[in-house]
Image (cartoon, rainbow, N blue to C red):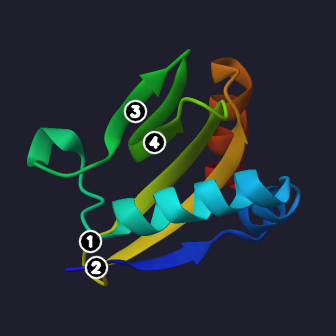
Amino acid sequence: MSYQIEFMEEAYNDLEALDGSVKQQVYAAILKVSQNPLPNTEGGLGKPLGNKQGRNLTGCSKIKLVKSGIRVVYQLVRMGEIMTIIVIAAREDDEVYEIAAKRIKE
């Protein structure tokens, strides 16, 4: 049961700005998680976010690529089985979550 992957325009730009090998790693991780993107609390592969550093990211999950230091924040639309990628950025938590919160509000 794979979810359809959609990118916010800004997230697609984030992906395109990455180095070639890192871009491939990120895309492979997104494809893997899209097979079961539910939060790990529901048996999925996503790590739920909730409130992070004072930013309400409830309903969002993250993919963490430890070696490359990249985080991917995404949101699920369960009814249509869509996985929307919100941000792809380096691992500085504050920055990644701040960007995600801003993009969700817009």
Q: Callout 4: 10 Å neighbours few (<14), some, many (20+)? A: many
Residue under pointer 2 = 2
| Left or right placement of residue 75 versus residue 59 in this view | right
Choose between 36 and 68: the one closer to the eye.
Answer: 68
Q: How crowded is mark 2: few (under 14 residues within 10 Å), some or many (20 or more)?
A: some
Residue at (27%, 49%) from the top-left corner? 45
Mark drawn on residue 49: 3
Residue 105, given in percent of the width and then of the height, sits at 65, 50
Q: Name the residue under label 4.
A: 62
Q: Mark 1 points at which residue?
A: 78
Residue 72 position, x and y percent, is 57, 47
**What's under tag 4, amino acid-wise?**
Lys
Secondary element at tag 1? loop
Badge 4 marks a residue whose secondary structure is strand
Q: In this view of the protein, which residue sits in the foreground, 5 or 53?
A: 5
Image depth: mark 2 or mark 1 in front:
2
Give the class, few, some or many, for how many residues have Cα within 10 Å of label 3's Cα (few <14, many ≥20). some
**Does residue 61 appear to the left or right of 42 in the view shown?**
right
Q: Residue farthest to the top?
A: 53
Q: Nearer the viewer, residue 80 or 47?
A: 47
40 is higher (above) or lower (below) than 32: above
Nearer-N-terminus badge (3/4) = 3
Q: Which badge, 3 or 1, comes first in the chain's sequence?
A: 3
Q: Using the numbered discs, state the Cα–Cα distance from disc 2 to disc 4 in whole angstroms.
A: 17 Å
Query: Disc 2 residue type?
Result: Ser
User: Which quadrant: the N terminus?
Assistant: bottom left
Q: Name the image quarter holding residue 81.
A: bottom left
**Amino acid at the residue labelled 1:** Arg
Decide which of tag 3 and tag 2 comes sooner along the chain. Answer: 2
Q: Do the residues labelled 3 and 4 touch (CB within 8 Å)?
A: yes
